[in-house]
Image (cartoon, rainbow, N blue to C red):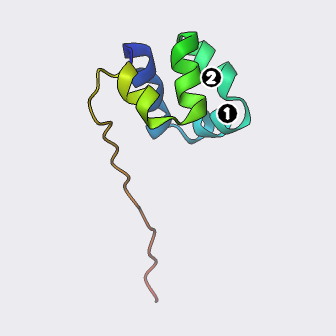
């Protein structure tokens, strides 16, 4: 995928309000980041083969971190 696509996913990984906006209106967020029509279609479809083709045939990598808050009993 293009730099625009990578920037969008990078920004969403750090910004919960952007994630909410994406969930509410994917097209608007993708247009704001400058994704092409083909990239938008690939992201919306979730078609793994189509996404791999756009990123040059390599496997996409995603790391998900789970953070929890703990409180001390006093």
Of the two numbered discs 2 and 1 on the same chain, state the one appearing first in sequence.
1
The dot on residue 29 is: 2
Q: Position of residue 63 (x, y in %)?
A: 33, 48
Look at 45% across and 39% down and name the residue there.
13
Q: Is residue 17 left or right of residue 64?
A: right
Residue lying at the far right of the rendered structure: 24
Q: Is residue 12 left or right of residue 22?
A: left
Tell me where residue 58 sits by quadrant.
top left
Q: Nearer the viewer, residue 73 or 51?
A: 51
How many numbered marks have been drawn onto this rendered protein structure?
A: 2
Look at 44% across and 15% down and name the residue there.
4
Q: In the image, is residue 28 above or below residue 10?
A: above
Q: Nearer the viewer, residue 66 or 57?
A: 57
Q: Measure how far apart labels 2 and 1 are at the Cα level.
A: 7 Å
The dot on residue 44 is: none
Q: Position of residue 42 (x, y in %)?
A: 53, 25
Q: Secondary structure at mark 1?
A: helix
Q: Which quarter of the rendering shows the N terminus? A: top left
Q: In the image, is residue 63 above or below residue 54?
A: below
Tell me where residue 50 sits by quadrant.
top left
Q: Count residues near mark 2 (Cα–Cα under 10 Å), then give few for <14, some for 14-19, many for 20+.
A: some
Res. 49 in view: yes
Look at 60% across and 14% down and name the residue there.
32
Asked if the residue under mark 1 is in contact with the one under mark 2, i.e. CB atoms within 8 Å, the reply is yes
Q: Secondary structure at mark 2?
A: helix
Q: Is residue 34 left or right of residue 70?
A: right
Q: Which residue is mark 1?
A: 21
Look at 64% across and 33% down and name the residue there.
22
Res. 10 in view: no
Q: Position of residue 25 (x, y in %)?
A: 72, 29
Q: Count residues near mark 1 (Cα–Cα under 10 Å), then give few for <14, some for 14-19, many for 20+.
A: some
């Amino acid at each position: 995928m293009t730099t625009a696509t990578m920037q969008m996913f990078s920004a969403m990984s750090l910004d919960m309000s952007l994630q909410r906006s994406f969930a509410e209106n994917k097209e608007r967020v993708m247009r704001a980041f400058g994704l092409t029509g083909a990239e938008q279609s690939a992201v919306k479809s979730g078609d793994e083969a189509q996404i791999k083709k756009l990123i040059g045939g390599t496997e996409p990598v995603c790391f998900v971190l789970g953070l929890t808050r703990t409180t001390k009993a006093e």
